[in-house]
Image (cartoon, rainbow, N blue to C red):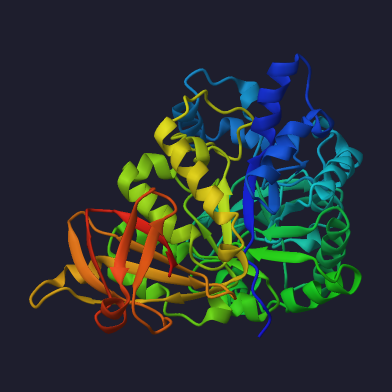
Amino acid sequence: MEKPFYPSMYQVNTRTWLTDLSAEIGKEATFDDIPDHALDGFKEMGFDWIWFLSVWCTGEQGQKISRTNAVWRREFEETLSDLKEEDIGGSGFAIADYHVHPGLGGDEALKRLRERLTARGLKLMLDFVPNHMGPDHPWVSEHPEYFITGTEEDLQNHPLNYMRLHTHQGERILAYGRDPYFDGWPDTVQIDYSNPVVIEAMTNELVRIAGQCDGVRCDMAMLLLPDVFEKTWGRKAKSFWPEAINDVRQQHPHFCFMAEVYWEMEWTLQQLGFDYTYDKRLYDRLHEGMAKPVREHFLAERDYQDKLVRFLENHDEARIASTLDLPQHEAAAVITYLSPGMRFFHEGQLEGKRKKISPHLIRGPKETVDAGIQEFYTSLLSVLKQPMFRTSRWQLLECTPAWEENNTWESFIAFAWEGEERELVLVVINYAPHDGQCYLQLPKMEKGFGHWELKDIMNSVAYSRDSHDLLTKGLYLGMKPWQYHVFKVTR
């Protein structure tokens, strides 16, 4: 079996970051103005991938829709109490052209940024939005046949899913991009994957994008699956992902594909060629606060888990600091990031920011740093940099009752990381709002007399335990609500 490697990724909100930088340097900042020390900082924190969100061109039509949509506007005002029109740049997912926005410096500035990242051993992740385009995209006017068309009746009966647009071929009624469960996104136009010409055109776009970065995060990737597409639009779609991924890898063999995916379709997309898929189910179960579903989540096959993207927040989700109290937040983070797969951190998460920033906005609110959260993540990232948690063997451990009629053992979640030189780290969490006790059944350990030292590498406590007791009974644990340990075990 190939030795695993578990990378860490940091998501940059590109437009808000450069807006802040512009204010700092007194001019409109581009990629070329990002200071070297910021890129050095990513490397020092142990990140392997940097995802620059929303670098592609947006258009005036998409921006106008963002500025006039009443529901969205209320959300923007909740984020920015001093909201201005110029703060609403239009959604970074209503793409008008897969070239870097001129305000960010264009394609050449991105090329120079990528070279600077590569020099530091960092890889560049960008967006690919395969399901839809912004209404400003040239294809909408030049090739309206690339998109789902509707009738006057569709527009009348489903005004939240269709719009009237003027194209070079005359007036057309086109569908908004959407998934089968919700109304459409009114600043997008739905691509028609039942058209073979579209498959070729989108594949060519993807191949070209692959020349500008090291990987892409594919927005709502499951919407292109033929059965999902047919459920949504009543049309039989052509296969896209396996062929497109193969075409990219013929030119870029090590290119990385990461899928945003829901509805229990993670394994399906992994089988189609994706290197990584979102693990939204773990995120949801951690928020529910019940240990058993979280523990059972880790019973899945390792080949599957190694390709999951573990996260606590991203641009689509509420800030974790605003949804979980600090003790549960820390416990959830230890579970999320000390399990196998890609570790995904969002800009602002490490500082404990609490306000979600819409992808439509190009400015974020000023927030103070939460010193406690920042200190925790500094410690966690220091641990994650250790080779033990990046290339070693991981396994889920069993917990058993500490005594009869004590069911608190069910609130425990425990992992082991085993290195090649008999290194052993135990990760154990009492994921519950109450005290808990259990015996932790350890992986196979060297037999013999004497004691083993358990040193917590995150909380600076240490314990000595008799080796015979550990081997026969297990490790007794009595832990407070949401408490966690990361024990390095030595003879």
Res. 294 in view: no
Assign the N terminus to one quadrant of the image: bottom right
Rendered position, 282 above or below 15: below
Residue 113: give x, y in percent of width and height.
83, 41
Q: Tell me where residue 18 sits by quadrant.
A: top right
Rendered position, 419 above or below 376: below
Viewer-nearest residue: 400 or 89: 400
Which residue shows up at 65% across the image and 41% down it? 12
Single out the residue that lies furthest toward the left: 405
Q: How many marks?
A: 0
Left or right of 176 on screen, residue 318: left
Which residue shows up at 78% across the image and 17% down it? 27
Which residue shows up at 46% across the image and 34% down it? 355
Assign the C terminus to one quadrant of the image: bottom left
Residue 316: give x, y in percent of width and height.
52, 48
Residue 65: give x, y in percent of width and height.
62, 36
Res. 137 in view: yes
Rendered position, 109 above or below 292: above
Viewer-nearest residue: 201 or 485: 485
Viewer-nearest residue: 27 or 391: 391
